[in-house]
Amino acid sequence: KSTTKVGTAVVSASAAGLTDGSIGVKTTPGSATQLKLSSSLGSITADGLSTATITVEIRDEFGNLVTSAEREVKFTISGPGVFDDGTTKKSTQATAGIVTLNLKSTVNIGTIKINASSSGLDSDAVEIPAIPASARKIICYADPAKITADGQSQATINAVIADENGNTVTSADNTIVFSCAGEGSLQGGNVVD
């Protein structure tokens, strides 16, 4: 009796005084029922240059690769990513049950979701976080941006550490030192960790 996995079962027979005999029985995948989508990376840098390999496999109900499957697979991307040709939709023919494509980041952070579908098969999706690149600069914000020169009005100044594309780098551990020049002064501390 077969298992649910593709492979070879070797059956041996032996008897006293005789040469043993054996035979291998191959188990093959069943009919294609589903797609299995995966990414070469768990996250991708939002720098507009980074790429990840996206692979879809056509599998049977037990998860075995159906190498005889040569079906059309449709892909869509939502979120801050594109295929290497700059598009977010693509249709490709599977070869030996597999399709491989390249995903490219944009300069925006967020979650990239890739969907794969093929007629008559269960579809699959994978999500890849697009994370900030390395910390490169400080971006300052004032709330409000204008105040009255009356000796009483105040603005709250916020500073964030960002990558070269302006994405906040939440993992940065730099110390920010505030200073003030011109017509105004700082109240409170000027060093923030």
Image (spheres, helix red, strand yellow):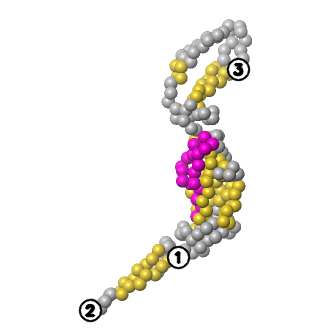
96 to 89, vertically: above or below: below
Residue plotted at (66% across, 14% down): 154
Check disc 3: other Cα within 10 Å, few if <14, some if 14-19, many if 20+. Answer: few
Q: Earlier in the sequence, mark 1 or mark 2?
A: 2
Q: Which residues are magenta?
A: 39-57
> Could you tell me how far apart the alpha carbons at marks 1 and 3 are, in whole angstroms?
68 Å
Question: Disc 2 marks which residue?
Answer: 17
> Would residue 148 appear left or right of 140 to someone viewing this image?
right
Question: Disc 3 marks which residue?
Answer: 145
Q: Earlier in the sequence, mark 1 or mark 3?
A: 1
Q: Locate residue 42, reporting x and y percent.
A: 54, 49
Whether residue 49 is in magenta: the answer is yes
How many numbered marks have been drawn onto this rendered protein structure?
A: 3
Residue plotted at (60% across, 40% down): 47
Residue plotted at (27% across, 90% down): 16
Amino acid carrying mark 3 in the image: Ala
Q: Are marks 1 and 3 in contact (CB under 8 Å)?
A: no
Judged from the image, the secondary structure of the residue bearing numbered disc 2 is: loop
Amino acid carrying mark 1 in the image: Thr
Question: Disc 1 marks which residue?
Answer: 28
Taking the view exactly as shown, the residue that stands out farthest to the bottom is 17
Q: Residue 142 is drawn in which quadrant? A: top right
Residue 110 in view, yes or no:
no
Residue 122 in view, yes or no:
yes
38 to 111, vertically: above or below: below
186 to 87, vertically: above or below: above
